[in-house]
Image (cartoon, rainbow, N blue to C red):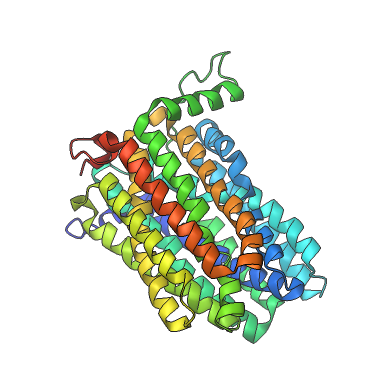
């Protein structure tokens, strides 16, 4: 097992539980995204409603630092178990709505808001658990393998969610979603517990507000962390909206596809991302994380620019596959950089602040809705992509010593 880098993390017992638990949770996320996104688009006929629904899924990014702080205090495994129990409860509520024909945009939006408060911090807890249970030499392969949970689930979850709705209807499809969440919760109970002591813990001065303020101060005072945070916000604002919730609009209004066609668009991007994650897990020890992150971010925005101008769905799927591939070589090194350069006692808070960058996605989605309706998807996508390329270059130049020099800590192999 040690001779195969991608399999080495499975020597750790905790990871043998965490990986399938994360995989099933991601699978359920994607199934829900297809089922509910399509329901909102069809029932309202509005791209603005679709964009608003997609934005609600990331509402919890505003309180992600609090989740990171809570993980530091009470244990990341314990917090993740609580979060996944909430997923089960909300999925059961949605299942009842669809089975009783009471589903409508209003209750769906309400439950989506509740889910959106919790779910964005799931990836934070996953990364923190990997960071605290993995030996240093396993970190890059482990992060690559961990990333495959979201990427592979996006392929399987998107296709299976569309297929289940087409064959069984939304109600019975949600029976499957609830079951997947329940199994994920059960597996999470087997993840190892290893909690790092928080600086100042147990003293009178360690109030939640003070701990949170220390996390923001640490990010601002560490140049490489600040640069990565800005790049993460830019990616979420300008890159993910085009390959996320807006794909439902592209499938229905540009390519003339049905729900199954939407599943194939999602699966194309996720298939490329899965291949990228596998390559990172097997060859990640040979790359310079920060340099790779910058180059692949530029490539990702370039592929998004090409996708914005394509009107043939097969060509669009090929471009999405390429965009997904380079996306993994951007996001995995980004997480590794933060885990490597951050002091252990600050990891929870820093990764919580990192999730605040995800708030760029709902902001980008909400701005893209009116733009798509008035200017069209091609112009909107081109504007977002060119904006992303320009600001990525600015970040790379401004923090070139931290992100480009071979001797920098962010480029250590």
| Quadrant position of residue 254 | bottom right
Q: Is residue 111 left or right of residue 136?
A: right
Determine the residue positioned at 57% across, 47% down.
359
- With respect to residue 224, does 172 lie above or below? below
- With respect to residue 250, does 258 lie above or below? below
Identify which residue, 8 or 46, lies in the foreground.
46
Determine the residue positioned at 56% across, 19% down.
206
Determine the residue positioned at 35% across, 55% down.
298
Q: Quadrant of the C terminus?
A: top left
| Quadrant position of residue 108 | bottom right
Identify which residue, 369 or 233, lies in the foreground.
369
- With respect to residue 100, does 26 lie above or below? above
- Residue 138, x across and y down, in percent: 26, 48
- Residue 280, x across and y down, in percent: 28, 58
- Residue 357, x across and y down, in percent: 51, 44
- Residue 250, x across and y down, in percent: 56, 74
The reply to whether residue 178 is in sight is no
The reply to whether residue 210 is in sight is yes
Q: Quadrant of the N terminus?
A: bottom left
Q: Is residue 296 left or right of residue 355?
A: left
Determine the residue positioned at 34% across, 61% down.
326
Residue found farthest to the bottom: 167
Q: How many marks on residues?
A: 0
């Amino acid at each position: 097992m040690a001779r195969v880098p991608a399999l080495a993390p499975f020597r750790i017992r905790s990871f043998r539980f965490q990986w399938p638990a994360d995989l099933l949770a991601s699978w359920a996320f994607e199934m829900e995204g297809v089922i509910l996104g399509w329901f909102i688009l069809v029932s309202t006929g509005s791209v603005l409603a679709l964009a608003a629904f997609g934005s609600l899924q990331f509402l919890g990014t505003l309180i992600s630092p609090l989740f990171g702080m809570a993980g530091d205090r009470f244990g990341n495994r314990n917090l993740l178990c609580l979060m996944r129990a909430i997923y089960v409860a909300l999925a059961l509520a949605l299942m009842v709505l669809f089975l009783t024909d009471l589903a409508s945009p209003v209750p769906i939006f309400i439950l989506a808001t509740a889910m959106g408060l919790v779910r964005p911090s799931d990836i934070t807890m996953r990364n923190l658990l990997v960071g605290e249970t993995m030996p240093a030499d396993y970190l890059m392969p482990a992060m690559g393998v961990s990333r495959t949970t979201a990427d592979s689930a996006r392929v399987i979850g998107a296709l299976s969610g569309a297929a289940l709705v087409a064959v069984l209807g939304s109600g019975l499809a949600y029976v499957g979603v609830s079951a997947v969440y329940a199994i994920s919760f059960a597996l999470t109970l087997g993840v190892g517990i290893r909690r790092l002591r928080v600086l100042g813990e147990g003293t009178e001065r360690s109030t939640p507000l003070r701990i949170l303020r220390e996390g923001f101060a640490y990010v601002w005072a560490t140049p490489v962390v600040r640069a990565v945070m800005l790049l993460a916000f830019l990616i979420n604002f300008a890159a993910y909206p085009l390959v996320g919730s807006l794909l439902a609009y592209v499938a229905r209004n540009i390519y003339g596809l049905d729900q199954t066609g939407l599943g194939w668009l999602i699966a194309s991007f996720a298939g490329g991302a899965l291949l990228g994650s596998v390559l990172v897990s097997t060859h990640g020890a040979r790359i310079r994380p920060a340099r790779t992150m910058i180059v692949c971010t530029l490539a990702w925005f370039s592929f998004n620019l090409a996708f914005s101008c394509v009107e043939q769905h097969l060509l669009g799927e090929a471009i999405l596959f390429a965009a997904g591939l380079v996306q993994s070589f951007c996001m995995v090194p980004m997480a590794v950089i933060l885990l490597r350069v951050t002091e252990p006692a600050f990891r929870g808070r820093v990764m919580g602040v990192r999730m605040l960058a995800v708030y760029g996605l709902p902001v980008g989605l909400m701005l893209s809705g009116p733009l798509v309706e008035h200017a069209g998807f091609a112009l909107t996508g081109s504007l977002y992509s060119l904006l992303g390329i320009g600001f990525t270059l600015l970040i790379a130049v401004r923090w070139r010593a931290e992100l480009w020099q071979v001797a920098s800590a962010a480029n250590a192999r």
